[in-house]
Amino acid sequence: MHHPFQLISSETRDLTPDLAKEFSTMAGSVSERDLKPKRLTYLKEAVLNGMAITFNWATVEIAETGKVIRMNGNHSSNVLSQLDGAFPDGLRVHIDRYKAGTMLDAVQLFRQMDSRQSARTIDDVAGAYQGLHEDLKETPKDAARKAIDAVGWYRRLEGAPVPSGDDRFDLFNQTELHPFIKMVGRVLSKKTPEFTTPVLAAMFATFEKDPREAEGFWIDVAKQGGQFEPGHPTVVLDNWLCSGTAKDGTQLKSREIYRGCVIAWNAFRHGKNLPTNDRPFGNFDSKKSMPDID
């Protein structure tokens, strides 16, 4: 059986500026990813904030050319080589050295490193933060993540600062949000694909106003209004969300969806029915502010 590559040596070493420079200036594989500014910034911040773990670098010797090239470590070695006097103490790097027959074999090696199939997903990261809290154990992970995304969306709408990227999952540590997260877990199901982030953001806004009544309202929306008449706000809202289209046939915008949800909630709170036509919430104007929550 043909083996496209083989491991020659493997060692873990102290990271030094000279070693970082050696790797950053080494010729890279044709399969190597281009340097991305966002990834460079992310790695630099991780290193300077003391969040860096042992780096994993690799080289490969191509038998048909005799050249040794870098297979892994392009971004991290470039970042580290440019830190100058800010280079931290105590960093370590694990270096694997391979040998491959051809560049095609080296591409097969590249595919084994940080493969998409084994990479951490957003759900994995969210689940790790959720797992810190025993009271959220029974809440489905996808529902919990969507709840956190919705809280962030709503707070940005309100002009409040919200952590970006995976840092947003720090919101799991705000225990006052746990009742809402658990409510989302009770409302969402495979039958509620129309409950997108702006819908859940409106759910959060109504939950803050009246938790008990909000849960009943959104359960009825999820059940397509149940036994209510056609003009009931929960029926009208669900039909509108499921259609997913604005009056001109285009897809509903996020702020438009949020606005419609709030109008439906307000009508529900005041015991009023809504029109059953294709514009139950009137015309949407992105320049106008969102309605208040009654």
Image (cartoon, grey):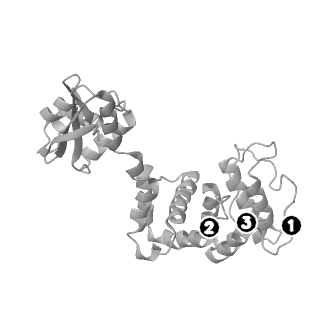
- The residue nearer to you, when weighing 131 against 42, is 131
Q: Which residue is disc 3 drawn over? A: 265
Going from N to C along the chain, the mark reached first, 2 or 3, is 2
Task: Name the mark nearer the viewer: 3 or 1.
Answer: 1
Q: Which residue is disc 2 drawn over? A: 188
Q: Secondary structure at mark 3?
A: helix
For residue 164, say whether it is visible.
Answer: no
**Left or right of 15: which side holds 244?**
right
Where 179 sits versus 141, above or below? below
Q: CA distance from mark 2 to mark 3?
A: 18 Å
Which quarter of the figure has residue 261? bottom right
Where 190 sits versus 255, above or below? below
Q: Secondary structure at mark 1?
A: loop
Position of residue 217 measured from the top left corner of the image (x, y, whole percent): 71, 71
Q: CA distance from mark 3 to mark 1?
A: 16 Å
Q: Residue at x 37, y 30 (%)?
A: 34
Q: Residue at x 28, y 37 (%)?
A: 4
Split into 4 quadrants, where in the image is the N terminus? top left
Split into 4 quadrants, where in the image is the C terminus? bottom right
Going from N to C along the chain, the mark reached first, 2 or 1, is 2
Sort mark 1 into few (<14), some (14-19) or many (20+) by Cα contacts within 10 Å: some
Which quarter of the figure has residue 31? top left
Number of marks present in the image shown:
3
For residue 227, say whether it is visible.
Answer: yes
Q: Name the kind of residue labelled 1 in the image.
A: Pro
Where 218 sits versus 2, above or below? below
Q: Which residue is disc 1 drawn over? A: 230
